[in-house]
Image: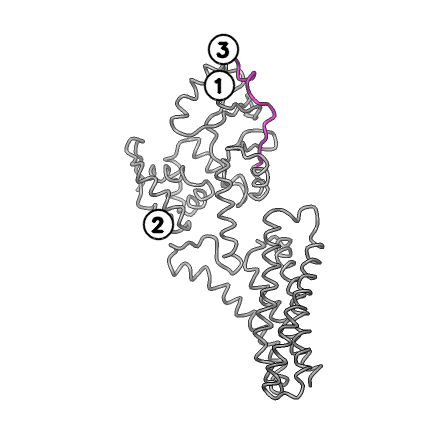
């Protein structure tokens, strides 16, 4: 449908229900839900949704329907949506609302109040943005200042000059860091010349950051950010399956390493019992380091250096944890080897302990360096990072274990 409806025809309850549904759908599913709605209803629903979500949904529509939706939107909203899409994903530019409370410094208080009288009926307004003739942001008016000012006073006398602003290219992480320092309800977004481009609400920043953090656990194992609980099974299969094929390929690499020591396993069958123990323990060590590194990247803690210190710390922790769990695992191997009648239980125990120490150390290093390497390569540090980590830990732990067994026991 492409019919345009007057505002009076909107059912507020239906719009709110649509917005609620959109926040629990991926872009493709949201388009399916909205496709049967009139363009004007879609405009209203997207206007109330998180701007980043609205951008994803709008540009998932086909070109013809998207053009019809944009044509049904008010001019300022249409321009804002088009402008937002020109900025990178996960940037402030994708989160902008159109600035609706815009005034000039030469206006009087009474003129400003009259201008804003209609604006506040449509939206919650905390600040009025003061711009000059070139559209540059020169000040901010807090509404309480208008309440106590004389009607004839000029806005230039009341406004806060040199207001803080964000840039549209700023990453969400950096914007959140600035927001945590200030806790403003809304932030102006300006270009390099200081021209007002849009407004980002503090609530929008926190909502988007919460979504990014919730999606991080999934991206570590190849689950796309677009997938939700309501995503159809066939689409979920297309999202997930390629990563599982990659995981299978990396598992073949680990299997090849084990295959190289087939003769060793034939002679020391007892080793096979401890292979999953070693792989699981080193894998958990690597995941701990990975989680800390991803958190540091998300919070911007690597800016200004410090990567070397993090790697050294995780290597030390891996080494120390390897010693402690290696002693326990070595004792377990000693007892099990004695029960199996092995002639060299002490050497098998030593092999397990040394392999555990080496594997945990390497796992700590791998867990801290993989996300940094992905980031340096321009990729998302969280994307399927656990798959690469699992490959590294399996190859090293099994290879080290079987090599030591061949050297010390046989």
| Dominant SS type (magenta) | loop
Q: Is residue 74 above or below residue 130?
A: below
Q: Which stretch did the figure color magenta?
A: 150-167
x, y (%) of residue 105? 54, 18
Q: Mark 2 sits on what residue?
A: 32
Q: Is residue 20 left or right of residue 108?
A: left
Mark 1 or mark 2, earlier in chain: 2
x, y (%) of residue 261? 63, 81
How dense is the environment of label 3, judged by Cα within 10 Å: few (below 14), some, or many (20 and up)? few
Q: Is residue 368 above or below residue 169?
A: below
Q: Is residue 120 above or below residue 26?
A: above
x, y (%) of residue 298? 59, 49
Mark 1 and 3 residues: CB-CB less than 8 Å, in contact? Answer: no
**Which quadrant: the N terminus?**
top left
**Residue 116 colored in magenta in the image:** no
Mark 1 or mark 3, earlier in chain: 1
Residue for point 59% across, 82% down: 336
Q: Is residue 305 left or right of residue 299?
A: right
Question: Judging from the image, what secondary structure is the residue with disc 2 in?
Answer: helix
Q: Is residue 408 left or right of residue 70?
A: right
Residue for point 63% across, 77% down: 331
Marks 2/3: CA–CA distance: 53 Å
Question: Judging from the image, what secondary structure is the residue with disc 3 in?
Answer: loop
Marks 1/2: CA–CA distance: 46 Å
How dense is the environment of label 2, judged by Cα within 10 Å: few (below 14), some, or many (20 and up)? few
Quarter of the view holding residue 235 = bottom left
Q: Mark 3 sits on what residue?
A: 152
Q: Nearer the viewer, residue 313 or 393?
A: 313
Mark 2 or mark 3, earlier in chain: 2
Question: Judging from the image, what secondary structure is the residue with disc 1 in?
Answer: helix
How dense is the environment of label 1, judged by Cα within 10 Å: few (below 14), some, or many (20 and up)? some
């Amino acid at each position: 449908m492409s019919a345009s409806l007057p505002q009076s025809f909107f059912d507020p309850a239906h719009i709110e229900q649509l917005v609620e549904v959109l926040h629990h759908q991926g872009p493709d599913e949201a388009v399916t839900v909205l496709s049967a709605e009139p363009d004007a209803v879609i405009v209203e629903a997207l206007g109330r949704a998180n701007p980043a979500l609205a951008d994803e949904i709008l540009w998932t529509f086909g070109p013809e329907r998207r053009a019809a939706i944009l044509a049904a939107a008010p001019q300022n909203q249409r321009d804002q949506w088009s402008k937002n899409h020109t900025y990178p994903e996960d940037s402030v530019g994708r989160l902008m609302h159109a600035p609706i409370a815009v005034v000039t410094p030469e206006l009087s208080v009474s003129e400003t109040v009259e201008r804003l009288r209609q604006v506040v009926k449509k939206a919650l307004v905390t600040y009025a943005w003061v711009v000059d003739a070139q559209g540059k942001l020169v000040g901010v008016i807090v509404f309480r200042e208008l309440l106590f000012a004389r009607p004839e006073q000029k806005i230039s006398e009341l406004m806060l000059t040199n207001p803080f602003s964000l840039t549209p290219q700023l990453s969400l992480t950096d914007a959140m860091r600035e927001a945590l320092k200030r806790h403003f309800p809304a932030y102006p977004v300006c270009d390099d010349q200081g021209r007002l481009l849009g407004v980002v609400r503090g609530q929008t920043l926190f909502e988007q950051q919460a979504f990014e953090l919730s999606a991080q656990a999934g991206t570590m194992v190849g689950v796309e950010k677009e997938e939700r609980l309501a995503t159809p099974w066939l689409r979920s299969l297309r999202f997930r399956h390629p990563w599982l094929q990659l995981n299978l390929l990396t598992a073949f690499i680990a299997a090849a390493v084990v295959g190289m020591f087939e003769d060793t396993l034939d002679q020391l069958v007892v080793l096979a019992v401890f292979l999953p123990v070693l792989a699981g323990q080193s894998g958990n060590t690597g995941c701990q380091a990975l989680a800390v590194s991803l958190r540091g990247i998300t919070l911007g803690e690597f800016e200004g250096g410090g990567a070397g210190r993090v790697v050294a710390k995780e290597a030390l922790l891996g080494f120390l944890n390897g010693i402690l769990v290696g002693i326990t695992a070595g004792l377990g191997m000693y007892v099990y080897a004695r029960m199996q009648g092995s002639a060299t239980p002490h050497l098998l125990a030593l092999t397990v302990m040394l392999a555990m120490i080496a594997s945990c150390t390497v796992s700590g290093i791998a867990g801290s360096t993989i996300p940094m390497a992905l980031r340096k390569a321009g990729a998302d540090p969280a994307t399927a990072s656990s798959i690469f980590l699992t490959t590294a830990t399996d190859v090293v732990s099994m290879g080290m274990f079987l090599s030591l067994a061949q050297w010390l026991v046989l």
